[in-house]
Image: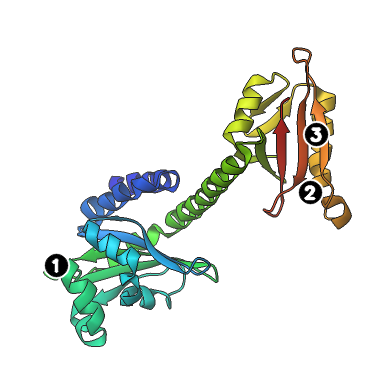
Amino acid sequence: MQSLTDLVGEIYEAAYNPGHWAEVFRILCVDVLNAKSAAIMVDDYQLGTRTILGHYGLPKMAEITYNLGLARYDYAFKLQEKVPEGLASQIIDHREARITAPMYYRMILKPVDLGYIAGLTIFRNQEWHAGLGVHRGFAAQPFGQSEIGIIQQLFPHLQRAIRIHKEFSRLRAREQTLQDAMSRLALGVIEVNMDGQLRYCSEMAQRMLDQHPGVTISEGRLRVCDSAQHKALLELIDEALADIPERRKRNLAMGIEHGDRAHPLVVMVAPAATPGAVNLYLSDP
């Protein structure tokens, strides 16, 4: 099914561009499942919030009221909490919900015309619960097993995409915090994981690297043009990653020199808050 293949690509696009979830769910509803609307709800246990991550077909007011507190009446989401990760099913039939969850029926199902909801548990752990809901109206037919199977196929892609989305949100928040703190200090910040791959590079750090011929980023890794200085930097990173507490507490620094620059690019290496990563703080006098 070409539309399903296209949908997988759109899912990964939404991982980096949250506004793209609307297009993901439009394809899922209109081209694949003949549904009226769909949404991903996230219950963040650490923040104590339950919000709509992205949706298609829901009235704007429904999204606003849900995020402002109506979410606590979401009976479908509570049912989904009992379902293992990766399992899709039809979780709501309005004929049953009218009896078993009358408040939910009156406050959410009836006003928004949600007659049937097929759900997929994407994440369910101590940190958070994320679930997909696909909706049909009261006048429509329930979801069939083949349609539930299609939703099931999306599980690994949705899980990866939301994991990427959450990591990018964390990095964006960190970048904003760092930019606020570092804007007055003229420090560049780079985070490198234990495999040498860059996880984060602030705008200030990128500007410093663009202006200093001795250091570049190549294939997601930091490269020092001079081999001896490159080796020295890798040794500092390894030392910062070491499991010996006394060594991890030390801040390590070096100056990267280049013949075209009068002053070295100062690099301080320190363990990052993220396990298995280090921060490089750059200063170009």
> Please, what is the three-letter code of the amino acid marked with disc 3?
Leu
Where disc 2 sits, the SS reads helix
Question: In this rendering, is residue 251 above or below 131?
Answer: above
**Closer to the camera: disc 2 or disc 1?**
2
- Tag 1 or tag 3, which sits nearer the N-term? 1
Pointer 2: residues within 10 angstroms few (<14), some, or many (20+)? many
Judge by depth and name the residue closer to the eye, 204 or 17: 204
Q: Which mark is residue 140?
A: 1
Q: Residue at x 28, y 65 (%)?
A: 65
Q: Residue at x 21, y 58 (%)?
A: 59
> Please, what is the three-letter code of the amino acid marked with disc 2?
Leu
Residue 189 falls in image quadrant: top right
- Tag 1 or tag 2, which sits nearer the N-term? 1
Q: Residue at x 33, y 44 (%)?
A: 6
Q: Which mark is residue 167?
A: none
Where disc 3 sits, the SS reads helix
Which scheme is used to colour this image of the protein? rainbow
How far across and how far down the image is residue 24, in percent? 32, 49
- Residue named by callout 2: 241
Question: Mark 2 and 1 residues: CB-CB less than 8 Å, in contact?
Answer: no
How far across and how far down the image is residue 154, in percent? 39, 57
How far across and how far down the image is residue 177, in percent? 57, 47
Quadrant that contains the C terminus: top right
